């Protein structure tokens, strides 16, 4: 059907690129750079697995462009509407096909529009095995069709409306044209950055132009991409003729969303949407190393004042052509775990059921878990549905401490003492008997994930351990769990405030201070072991070789902490220097041990290489001797065949075969 529509509109099929276009079309001058797009093209055209959750493609996600064009996390922005993504779909601005692939896998008839010739070709390469997808190289304002669509998507596209149009209000004109292409009950799905997003107030550069405060100050020119605020965008959608619209909020933003909050989730008094939003902040690949203020601390204030939508970093909007569209939903929020091996990818939905909130978890891969995985020491626990517990995670409690200026070592020590008590309390309540001495505590293997972000303190004061995914086949020591807890908290906070004691302003300093305060005195071998275990877990979960062991630096400052401390005394500076030296020595030993091991392997490899080379020389000599012998034998054989005696014997044999004896 789509093919006949395109033919009638004058588009032709290019057999080299497998895309549709007008014969005179030359494409638009839009690119991430020639080198970048050639690399993406090479990856896509040579990949064997092109699916949304492809482990192969994810292994190539090593910078922002590759993650944006290849990561399966991109598709999360449309997963809330999966059941509605059928019929005829028009995707405007397909890029290199990350969203196109997802729409095709949903089974809809997809017409993907892309203005760049190269990007259109890449998008088709990404979907070449999906017969329900067609890619057209064309500008939207010049797109010719009489076809009407059930769903039209503008994912990261509306902000570019002014680049290819001369109208006074190009975004409004684009929305009006889109509405004219929808069926009576059709829907438009828009994803776009918020001009007034909280992270932009915190100093993050404007996504398209790379300058801080550019959008907030309204510095956009007519020939530049332009984003909009909540109220302005809602009004423009209404002006375009859409009857209803709903704003959902993706975190950290729409490009690589981890969670999506619905209108119901933002307004429900018995649902703590702040928890999901806060824990997604550091997953923003475009967040600068330093922000003007702590986003984790500001976000709860924003939510409490009803500004979650107005100050969201991005919007996810559904606009309907019909008054029959009812945006209300029983779903309060979605949380996606898709930056991992495809067999481990899952969707978590927080759903209102008969007045209560249920946590429903669903695996996304159709293949299921294999009977045997590659690491016998680790396993993945299949998720089940759970009751929702309203409260605050221990992660949030830690955030509230370390984002306040002049936080103290004693506060941190009290926090982790409480954490130890909670872990023992949960273990005892589940029938596990544990030694009370931290250095001797051995916990069950399914406590591997009992880090602060997975422990909820309910409104009634009860500690609940949720989301037990990663498990160890054997028991784990509390010292290793504590190491995991501390490092996960460091990784989960975008900006620390300056501490009172400079000693805890570095990763290693904080780690040693906490562990020593609980009677644990980890040596060099302990840290090396813990880092190795973390590397193995990361490799197991992601399917990609981890670099944690070689890249984790104990001397690195905590995010937001500087090396200068106003008013620091000579004694405290000396103490900080000595601590840093001690930490550096511990980790230097680990690196030295690793280097020696690698050198040993290299020496063994060189020895094996030398042996192989010697053996190859011997085999070559033997081959040459055999070839010489073969040549000699061949010469001798020819000499015999040409001799008179051989010819006479041949005549005798021939006569004998014919029964003649008178020769």
Image (tube, rainbow, N blue to C red):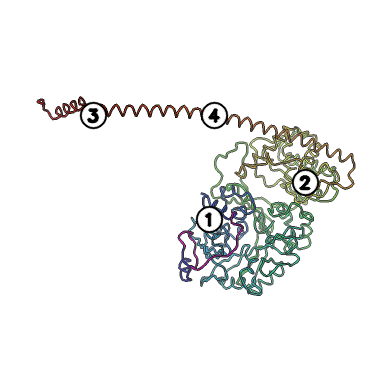
Measured Cα–Cα span from mark 4 to mark 1: 44 Å
Q: Which sits in the foreground, 323 or 522?
A: 522
- Is residue 23 inside the magenta stretch? yes
The secondary element bearing badge 2 is classed as: loop
The relative height of residue 367 versus residue 106 in the rendered view (above or below) is: above
Which region is colored magenta?
14-35
Dominant secondary structure (helix, strand or loop) of the stretch shown in magenta: loop
In the rendered structure, the answer to whether residue 411 lies left or right of residue 530 reads right
Between marks 3 and 4, how big is the CA–CA gap?
A: 48 Å
Q: Give the number of the disc on residue 610.
A: 4
Nearest to N terminus: mark 2 or mark 1: 1
Q: Position of residue 95 (x, y in %)?
A: 58, 60
| Numbered tag placed on residue 208 in the rendering | none
Looking at marks 4 and 1 on the same chain, the residue that comes earlier in the sequence is marked by 1
Sequence-first disc among 3 and 4:
4
Gap in angstroms between the C-alphas marked 2 and 4? 47 Å
Question: Within 10 Å of the Cα at label 3, are there few (<14), some (14-19), or many (20+) other Cα atoms?
Answer: few
Give the alpha-carbon distance from disc 2 to disc 3, as whole Å: 91 Å
The residue labelled by disc 3 is 642
Please give the label number shown on residue 558.
Answer: 2
Number of the label disc, if any, that sits on residue 126: 1
Given this view, does label 3 or label 4 mark the residue nearer the observer? 3
Residue 76, by quadrant, is bottom right
Going 56% across and 68% down the picture, which residue do you hit? 139
For the residue labelled by badge 3, is the local secondary structure a helix, a strand or a loop?
Answer: loop
Q: Secondary structure at mark 1?
A: helix
């Amino acid at each position: 059907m789509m093919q006949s529509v395109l033919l009638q509109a004058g588009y032709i099929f290019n057999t080299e690129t497998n895309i549709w276009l007008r014969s005179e079309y030359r494409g638009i001058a839009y690119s991430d750079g020639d080198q970048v797009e050639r690399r993406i093209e090479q990856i896509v055209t040579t990949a064997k697995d092109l699916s949304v959750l492809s482990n192969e493609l994810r292994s190539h996600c090593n910078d922002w462009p590759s993650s944006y064009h290849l990561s399966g996390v991109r598709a999360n922005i449309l997963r809330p509407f999966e059941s509605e993504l059928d019929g005829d779909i028009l995707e405007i601005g397909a890029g290199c096909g990350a969203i196109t692939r997802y729409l095709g896998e949903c089974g809809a008839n997809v017409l993907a529009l892309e203005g760049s010739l190269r990007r259109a070709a890449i998008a088709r390469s990404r979907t070449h095995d999906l017969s329900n997808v067609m890619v057209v190289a064309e500008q939207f304002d010049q797109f010719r069709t009489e076809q009407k669509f059930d769903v039209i998507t503008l994912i990261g596209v509306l902000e570019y409306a002014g680049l290819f149009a001369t109208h006074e209000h190009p975004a409004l004109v684009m929305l009006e044209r889109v509405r004219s292409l929808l069926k009576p009950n059709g829907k438009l799905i828009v994803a776009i950055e918020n001009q007034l997003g909280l992270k932009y107030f915190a100093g993050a550069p404007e996504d398209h132009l790379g300058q801080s405060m550019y959008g907030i100050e309204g510095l956009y020119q007519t020939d530049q991409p332009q984003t909009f605020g909540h109220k302005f965008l809602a009004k423009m959608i209404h002006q375009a003729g859409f009857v209803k619209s709903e704003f959902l909020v993706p975190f950290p933003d729409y490009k690589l969303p981890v969670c999506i909050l619905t209108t119901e989730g933002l307004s429900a008094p018995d649902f703590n949407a702040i928890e999901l939003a806060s824990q997604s902040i550091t997953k923003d690949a475009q967040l600068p190393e330093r922000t003007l203020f702590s986003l984790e601390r500001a976000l709860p204030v924003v939510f409490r004042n009803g500004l979650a939508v107005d100050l969201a970093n991005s919007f996810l909007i559904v606009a309907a052509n019909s008054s029959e569209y009812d945006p209300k939903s029983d779903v309060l929020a979605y949380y996606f775990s898709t930056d991992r091996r495809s067999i481990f990818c899952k969707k978590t939905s927080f759903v209102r059921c008969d007045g209560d909130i249920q946590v429903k978890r669903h695996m996304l891969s159709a293949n299921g878990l294999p009977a045997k995985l590659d690491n016998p020491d680790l396993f993945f626990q299949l998720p089940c549905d759970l009751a929702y517990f309203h409260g605050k995670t221990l992660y949030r409690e830690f955030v509230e401490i370390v984002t306040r200026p002049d936080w103290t070592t004693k506060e941190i020590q009290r926090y982790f003492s409480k954490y130890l008590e909670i872990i023992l309390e949960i273990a005892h309540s589940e029938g596990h008997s544990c030694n009370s001495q931290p250095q001797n505590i051995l916990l069950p293997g399914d406590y591997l994930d009992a880090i602060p972000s997975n422990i909820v303190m309910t409104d009634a004061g009860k500690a609940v351990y949720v989301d037990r995914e990663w498990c160890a086949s054997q028991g784990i020591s509390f010292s290793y769990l504590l190491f995991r807890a501390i490092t996960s908290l460091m990784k989960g906070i975008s900006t620390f405030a300056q501490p009172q004691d400079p000693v805890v302003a570095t990763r290693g300093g904080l780690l040693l201070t906490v562990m020593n305060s609980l009677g644990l005195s980890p040596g060099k071998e302990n840290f090396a072991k813990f880092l190795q275990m973390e590397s193995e877990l990361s490799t197991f979960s992601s399917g990609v070789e981890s670099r944690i062991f070689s890249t984790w630096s104990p001397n690195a400052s905590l995010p937001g902490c500087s090396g200068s401390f106003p008013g620091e005394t000579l004694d405290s500076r000396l103490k900080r220097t000595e601590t840093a030296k001690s930490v550096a020595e511990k980790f230097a030993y680990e690196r030295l041990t690793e280097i020696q091991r690698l050198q040993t392997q290299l020496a063994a490899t060189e020895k094996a290489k030398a042996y192989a080379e010697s053996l190859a020389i011997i085999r070559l000599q033997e081959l040459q001797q055999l070839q010489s012998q073969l040549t000699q034998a061949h010469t001798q054989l020819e000499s015999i065949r040409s001799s008179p005696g051989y010819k006479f014997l041949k005549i005798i044999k021939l006569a004998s075969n014919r029964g003649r004896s008178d020769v």
